[in-house]
Image: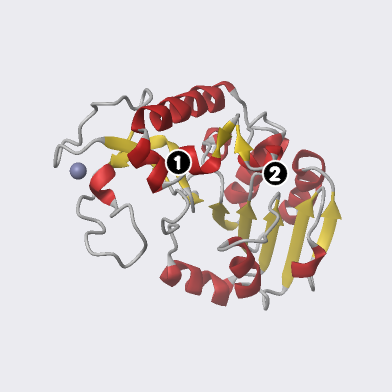
Amino acid sequence: MPSSTLNIVIFSGAGLSTESGILTFRDSNGLWEQHRIEDVASPEGWRRDPALVLEFYAKRYHAQAACLPNPAHHAIARLAARHSVLNITQNIDTLLERAGCSGVWHLHGRIDRQKCEEHHSLGFPGDAGMFTCDFLSAIERPIALGDQCPKCGGQLRPDIVWFGEPVDMREEELGKWVRKADIFIGVGTSAQVYPAAGLLSIFRNTPERFFVDPHPNYDVLDGFTVRTGSASAELPPLIDSLIAR
Ligand SMILES: [Zn+2]
């Protein structure tokens, strides 16, 4: 019987959910389901045409609800049931939750939540007016134009981090895990942009580091044990070997 509990950080990107049928803008040359990114994932796009943005995320909401967790999501849930796991993801879908994970840290927000448009200045971090309203809630249906914040009356918007907006970075929690992590696993991320690239660097002194991706970005994987392949093929055997320890 395995007895010791390991502290494991697992950091996932779009590649974790690709095999479940979730598409992102990375799949199609900067277009996200035929839309320009700046039209559907930026404060400027929101100001220009909120109806278009809400329609876009309504489609994403229904599309991801129709997708199912794949073996990689289920493997992560098994790992979290056996060891102490910090589950960080760049994904906005809820496939990890539906596989049984709780406490997932969504760096870029979640498709099944709404916040107030006054939540953020719609400008750059540090602008006056940030966090003027802290309303945030789960949704059971897509947000519609005219849906008002119960706190301040502002238009509700998706709880998605758009370009130019700050990611949900929790420095203090991250610091604790940097000190105690035994294992770091990266999966399905190109790890080329902030904050992904920074996370790999922050955990550079973690004793064991693994990376799973069909096209590993070796420039940032010094010291990693790399498993080249899809998340659903390569992650479950790695995780089951850790569960058996
Ligand atoms: Zn509000």
Residue 231 in view of the camera? yes
Picture layout, residue 38 above or below residue 88: above
Q: Amino acid at mark 2?
A: Gly
Q: Which residue is mark 2?
A: 15
Rendered image quadrant of residue 55: top left
* Secondary structure beneath label 1: strand
Residues at marks 2 and 1, CA–CA distance in whole angstroms = 17 Å
Rendered image quadrant of residue 181: bottom right
The label on residue 110 is 1
Instruction: Please state if 221 lies on the left or on the right of 59 as rendered.
Output: right
Picture layout, residue 196 above or below residue 222: above
Residue furthest out toward the left: 152
Q: Residue at x 36, y 27 (%)?
A: 51
Residue 158 in view of the camera? no
Residue furthest out toward the right: 228
Q: Residue at x 60, y 67 (%)?
A: 199
**Which sits earlier in the primary sequence, circle 2 or circle 1?**
2
Q: Position of residue 66 (x, y in %)?
A: 57, 21
- Front one among 133 and 199: 133
How crowded is the residue under tag 1: few (<14 C-alpha within 10 Å), some, or many (20+)? many
Instruction: Please state if 149 lies on the left or on the right of 120 as rendered.
Output: left
